[in-house]
Amino acid sequence: MKEKLSDLYAKDGTKTVLASVLSILIGLAMGSLIILVVGLANPNLGISGAWDGIRLTFAGIFSTGRDAAGALTFGFNSTNLGNMLFRATPLILTGLSVAVAFKTGLFNIGAPGQYLMGTAATLVIALSIPSGTMPGVMVWLLAFLGGTLAGALWGCIPGLVKAFLNINEVLACIMTNWIAANLVTWIFDGSKFRNLVENTKSGYIYKTTYALTQVDGVWTYVDGKGVSTAKMGLDKIFPGSQVNGGILIAIAIAILIYILMSKTTLGYQLKACGANRHAARYAGIADRRNIVLSMAIAGALSGAAAALYYLSSNTEFFWSTYQSLPATGFNGIPVALLAASNPIAVIFTGCFMSMLDIVGLQLTNLTAYNEYITDVIIAIIVYLSAFSLMIKLFLTGRKKRRAQAPVSESGGAQGAPAPEDGTRQEGGGQA
Amino acid sequence: MTFLIQQTLIYAVPLMIVALAGVFAERSGIINLALEGIMIFGAFVGVLFVNLTQQSGIFDAAKEAGNWVALQGFEILAMAAAALLGAVFSLLLSFASVNLRADQTIGGTALNLLAPALVLFLIRIIANQNILQMAQGDAASWFMLKKSFFGYGRGDDMGFFGETFINKTYLATYLCILLFVLLSILLYKTRFGLRLRSCGENPQAADSLGINVYKMRYAGTTISGALAGMGGFVYALTTAHCASTGDVAGFGFLALAVMIFGNWKPGNIAASALLFGLFKCIAASYSSIDINGDGVFLLSEIGVSPHVYRMLPYLITLLVLAFTSKKSRAPKAEGVPYDKGQR
């Protein structure tokens, strides 16, 4: 038994998981430290306020509010768990988007832009089709595929300029992000898709549950005539939450991407381009085509994230978005990094990130702290994952020393596995 | 015209100084993708410094007496505070990329995520809202240069030069231009500058000649952090009424584009920063630009959607990069962690 454990420990994958867990724990600890320092410095919070904050940071997902005496209570909370799965749906997909690009040696910081284009396409398609002209399933499918396609096309732009003009994809992605933000605002500015029915929702686009319906000969938007993702029974398991079948679709897509990247020729070619573009070309792989294709797949995944999020029947899109980019897109980066770009691991890290989201909400609702502390924790985790290779080396070195290996110091460095994970080795200096 | 020049300078100068910050880091071999984050952090520190100093009442007497020289000193102190803490913040990047040989792109992204999160977290706790402003008054009444400082009356005309470059401007703008010139000389005409640049081109050769590559890279990134932090505060002061919201509207990234467009050379960077400043200015205030002073606001009357103007800076960046990328030459060793054992 002991033998097996040490075998497991020696595996590269195990060390990757351990490095990620270590990053998460350090991130949470640093967040707690900040909460403690702020609590002690602020007389309104004090040590008890800080203690509440720290407990919520670690176990906010099981929080059930405060009891009559004002103490925090914890337990199984189906609303929180269901909402966690609901929020994980787009995060898993944007995480996959960044992960696929990483595997090809590209840094897809353009996920927010692709997500926005996916949002616009999904909403325009879903809201343009009058109710009754085709079955709801068709409308849903068209909207989903339209969003995915829009994301893919938007992702192609940085891919094309990278492949043919050698422009740094990071810069191209950032520019296309802001262009998308302005373009989407332009599309919806003055359009008929703006919610005019509910007074409190001005500035938002209709939910996809609305559809054009003929009432007394006039075409108007009516709630309940449109489409939304099927619940697939998940609302029975997590009553009182927003969860729907989208999470199952996201998991299925993650598995498909895993098969694509690990079991097909295309996946092999994409990864070969990521490892060494020039060597791949020498081996007869069309490197330019693969770069564009990789960015298109990444964009499609971000577009799908947006489609699933806005087809869920309980989300609304604030259309005047030209000054800000959706955080869901950026949060795909930590999801992918933490998962070391493994599509299956992305499912779990996506859930972890959305759990932090819920924790942030609990902190805002139940304490004087606010949700931004969870963003700080995420940033610290990303920072640590930048040198996850060093952490892995450290784990390897510790093991070696414990085993009294003859060559301890340099042996650890030599025995390090080739970086087949998200950590890029080549410099991104070309622009 | 006066309005156009003033507005363009306001946008161009932060871009210019932050692009130079990028040059210092990249010339030493470190890709500083964190410029945006450092700007956000610097803006917050500067505004917080102004806010706290105002609350402690140190400059109240000077304000009462209309002692504008003291108030300009106050402004410079705030810039220095932003620069100092920007440099400290950038140490996170240098530590990760020099000592731990981390991926610089991811390290920079981490700082870009960290800065707005941390800043908003603190602003919420300090101000109980999502924006931190000055404790009293506004940026114009405290820091702006005015006619009256130089003995002119309210209705007097200072002439074209005076009206454009002195009245209703900020000293910070000119300090940044001065710093830009001085630091460009430092980078190109001194021994230190030559050594720094050699670390970004061929660190192995530099090391063999006795230059400490690690130290040089720390120096480059720290100067970069200081400039970006200061640039962030100058941006907040001149365009955002001295308020911090955890956001600098993508200026850090735009500065990176300016740097690449300027081919990592200060002269070209100054020119391209002016070009981008002009487009930013058009995007922000196209409806009140009166080019030849005849009372016709041409840009708003030709019927182009405002969305087009807002999109222009980014669209132009992409197009310009597309046309210049073949000629651009980045420092050879940038982004590659220096490993002494490597040949």
Image (cartoon, grey):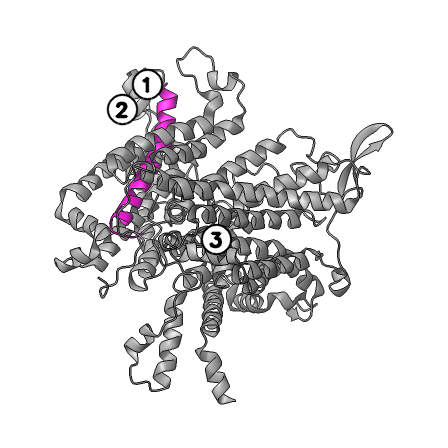
Residue found at the very far front of the displayed protein: A284
- Residue A365 visible in rendering: no
Mark 2 is surrounded, within 10 Å at the Cα level, by few (under 14), some (14 to 19) or many (20 or more) other residues, namely: few
Question: Camera-side residue: A391 or B17?
Answer: A391
- Residue A382 visible in rendering: yes
Q: Secondary structure at mark 1?
A: loop
Residue under numbered circle 1: B153
The residue under the point 36% across, 42% down is: B256
In the image, is residue B175 above or below residue A384?
A: above
Measured Cα–Cα span from mark 3 to mark 1? 62 Å
Residue B306: percent from left, percent from top: 52, 26
Q: Are marks 1 and 2 on the same chain?
A: yes
Residue under numbered circle 2: B150
Mark 3 is surrounded, within 10 Å at the Cα level, by few (under 14), some (14 to 19) or many (20 or more) other residues, namely: many
Q: Are marks 1 and 2 in contact (CB under 8 Å)?
A: no
Measured Cα–Cα span from mark 1 to mark 2? 9 Å
In the image, is residue A41 above or below residue A130?
A: below
Mark 1 is surrounded, within 10 Å at the Cα level, by few (under 14), some (14 to 19) or many (20 or more) other residues, namely: few
Tell me where residue B264 sits by quadrant: top left
Residue B22 is a magenta residue: yes
Q: Which residues are magenta?
A: B1-30
Residue under numbered circle 3: A101
Measured Cα–Cα span from mark 3 to mark 2? 58 Å
Q: Chain of mark 3?
A: A
Residue found at the very far right of the displayed protein: A216
Foreground disc of the pair 3, 2: 3
